[in-house]
Image (cartoon, rainbow, N blue to C red):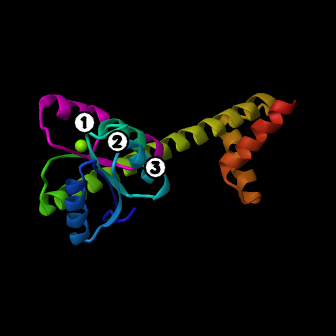
Amino acid sequence: MPAHPSRILVAEDEHLVATDLVMHLRDAGYKVVGPAPDGEAALEFARSADPDLALLDVRMPKRDGLSIAGEIYEELGIPAIILSAFSDDEYVRMAQQAGVFGYLVKPATGGQLRACIEVAWGAYVRACQSSKVNADLRRKLEERRIVERAKWILVQRKGLSEADAMHALQRHARSTRRKIVEVAQQLLDANELI
Ligand SMILES: [Mg+2]
């Protein structure tokens, strides 16, 4: 995961605002994807042009920025920052529920854009890391469960103690240069055939 985002998708239906955003982003050293003039075009850019992060206007033709934000994050793992002319509680609450990584009230300066983009990226990277930690934990638990089941089969079939069954799996893993979970899985697969 890079330290900074590079490709920023811009979706904004007001041409002048879009031009301004593009200019600010390029000045700050980002590459611009788009600008998309409506929600559907934004989705297409998100799917085809591999942006790192999306800046989405709330009110756009076809699809609004908030509904797209959720979709591109869940489907494509692209974090979004919402741009809006409004800061009413209702909009802010909807943005909160949509799981966006930032909210900017228009017109945003180049400095505000850059700060919001970089902070949003940091939050996104942390979110990815913690979901990776969760995935790793789930995998470890699953592996432990497989080894436990294999051990139990040995206990029942061969009359071994639990400790001896574990040693037998470890020895077999060492001698065949495989992971213990692979040996255990093979034993479970074979057991299903019996
Ligand atoms: Mg608009």
Q: Name the N-terminal-most of marks 3 and 1.
A: 3
Mark pair 2, 3: CA separation = 13 Å
Of labels 2 and 3, earlier in sequence is: 3
Residue that label 1 marks: 95
Give the residue type that dot 3 points to. Glu
- Disc 2, disc 3: CB below 8 Å? no
Q: Residue at x 28, y 31 (%)?
A: 97
Tell me whether the residue at label 2 lies in contact with that at label 1, contact meaning CB atoms closer than 8 angstroms: yes
Q: Is mark 1 within 8 Å of ligand 1?
A: no
Viewer-nearest residue: 63 or 90: 63
Residue sitting at 75 percent across and 36 percent down?
188
The residue tagged with tag 3: helix, strand or loop? helix
Image quadrant containing the N terminus: bottom left
**Three-letter amino acid code of the residue under disc 1:** Ala
Residue 69's tag is: 2
Amino acid type of the residue tagged 2 in the rendering: Ala
